[in-house]
Image (spheres, grey):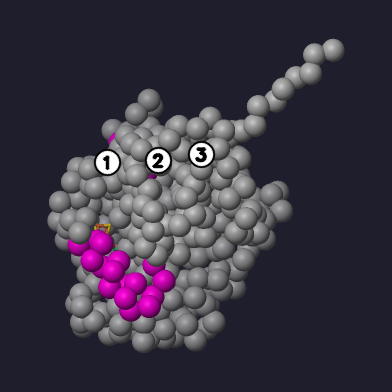
């Protein structure tokens, strides 16, 4: 009888020391692995650092909505596009605190407050500092995403009790100019440095499905993985196409990002940033449960939980509960 030799899965060696930077080609080589080998490597990496059956829940609240001066081509909150999003001035403290209490009651461990600003002015920041203090006092981790920070603002947020600041690189440097013209890549890196220097945890990721190439997806992941230290939290968003934004409508059918490529992106993020929380972020509403399950296998271990992201929909809490029950996943 013939003995069948089963080849071992292909493994691309990953350097342990992140002071060795990832090249885009190295990250692209991970993307190019056979799907099963890639998922296996990502799942193995995930298990070396995390309990694979636990997923962290963050809840988002838009504390200031719409009317943003920036031109981010994906964003329903830019004042330049007609998307039907209603502008809403900064919420008052009570509204934020009651939303945070509700998020906690629904099992969230982190509460993330988002504002459609280019960046906060000092008079904008003061009330946000109160929000951070009160949300923190509820025993929740606090996160803000307020746009670019000026000198000294990160320190004020830290003093108020801010645990995380979300500021995304969004895409590869080479594709960035196709999406945003009102701030550049370096502006984003500068804000991330201010956040890091103030001792706040960094939440930094990007969006895929905007018409970028695979090399550009690898370019985004290389940028994120080469941040030193790596971000504690890495949101991977699948573009939510909103009518009225420049990116609406063009990326359909064969131009749309295939689900397998999204899962590959999660897997590559996990392998290159082994100790970071990789968040399966925007786009879950449109994503079949089986694809979400693959993302969890590939190392995603955080989601946004709650019926809304900032302005667009997210799966209802009951749907997430049912999915977690099927997969025996427990919130962290
Ligand atoms: N205005 C601030 C800023 O841009 O830094 C904070 C809020 S902004 C909405 C936060 C992030 O949400 C963006 O950097 C982008 O990655 C993500 N985002 C916005 N619109 C999106 C969409 N339609 N689909 C997927 N992700 C989106
Ligand atoms: C992130 O990376 N994704 C979240 C959070 N950080 C702020 C935002 C997603 C927004 C999706 C579009 C919307 O709801 O307006
Ligand atoms: Fe404004 Fe942020 Fe939307 Fe860009 S992503 S338009 S900065 S709210």
Q: Quadrant of the N terminus?
A: top right
Magenta span includes 201? yes
Single out the mark in the foreground, 3 or 1.
3
Magenta span includes 118? no
Q: Quadrant of the C terminus?
A: bottom right
Whether ligand 2 has any atom under 8 Å from the Cβ at mark 3 is answered as no
When the figure is inspected, residue 258 is found, relative to residue 237, above or below; the finding is above
The answer to whether 199 appears left or right of 190 in the picture is right
Circles 3, 1 touching at the beta carbon (< 8 Å):
no
The answer to whether 173 appears left or right of 214 in the picture is left
**Circle 1 sits on which residue?**
247
Q: Which mark is residue 12?
A: 3
**Front position in the image: 163 or 313:** 163
Q: Which residues are magenta?
A: 187-211
Q: Secondary structure at mark 1?
A: loop
When the figure is inspected, residue 74 is found, relative to residue 67, above or below; the finding is above
Q: Secondary structure at mark 3?
A: loop
Whether ligand 1 has any atom under 8 Å from the Cβ at mark 1 is answered as yes
Which quadrant of the picture is home to ligand 1?
bottom left
The answer to whether 74 appears left or right of 332 in the picture is left
Q: Residues within 10 Å of mark 1 (few under 14, many from 20)?
A: many
Circles 3, 2 touching at the beta carbon (< 8 Å):
yes
Identified at 20% across, 75% down, the residue is 150
**Front position in the image: 126 or 20:** 20
**Circle 2 sits on which residue?**
26
Q: Secondary structure at mark 2?
A: helix
Q: Earlier in the sequence, mark 3 or mark 2?
A: 3
Residue 155 percent location from the top left of the image: 30, 82
Residue 244 seen anywhere in this rendered image of the structure: no
Q: CA distance from mark 2 to mark 1?
A: 29 Å
């Amino acid at each position: 009888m013939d003995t069948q030799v089963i080849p071992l899965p292909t493994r691309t060696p990953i350097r342990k020391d992140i002071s060795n930077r990832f090249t885009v080609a190295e990250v692209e080589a991970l993307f190019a692995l056979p799907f099963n080998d890639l998922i296996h490597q990502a799942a193995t990496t995930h298990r070396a650092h995390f309990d694979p059956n636990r997923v962290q829940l963050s809840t988002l609240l838009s504390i200031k909505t719409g009317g943003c001066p920036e031109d981010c081509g994906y964003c329903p909150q830019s004042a330049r596009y007609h998307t039907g999003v209603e502008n809403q001035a900064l919420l008052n403290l009570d509204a934020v605190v009651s939303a945070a209490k509700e998020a906690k009651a629904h099992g969230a461990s982190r509460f993330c407050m988002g504002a459609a600003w280019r960046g906060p002015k000092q008079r904008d920041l003061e009330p946000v500092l109160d929000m951070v203090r009160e949300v923190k006092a509820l025993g929740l981790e606090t996160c803000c995403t307020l746009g670019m920070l000026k000198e000294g603002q990160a320190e004020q947020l830290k003093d108020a009790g801010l645990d995380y600041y979300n500021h995304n690189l969004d895409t590869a440097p080479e594709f960035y100019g196709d999406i945003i013209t009102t701030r550049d890549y370096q502006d984003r890196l500068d804000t991330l440095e201010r956040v890091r220097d103030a001792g706040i945890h960094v939440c930094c990721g990007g969006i895929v499905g905007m018409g970028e190439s695979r090399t550009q997806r690898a370019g985004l992941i290389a940028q994120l993985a080469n941040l030193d230290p790596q971000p504690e939290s890495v949101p991977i968003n699948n573009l939510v196409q909103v009518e009225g934004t420049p990116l609406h409508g063009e990326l359909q059918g064969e131009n749309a990002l295939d689900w397998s490529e999204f899962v590959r992106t999660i897997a590559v993020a996990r392998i290159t940033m082994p100790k970071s929380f990789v968040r399966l972020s925007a786009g879950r509403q449109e994503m079949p449960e089986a694809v979400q399950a693959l993302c969890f296998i590939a190392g995603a271990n955080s989601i946004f939980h709650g019926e809304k992201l900032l302005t667009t929909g997210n799966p209802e809490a009951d749907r997430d509960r049912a999915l977690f029950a099927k997969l025996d996943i427990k919130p962290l």
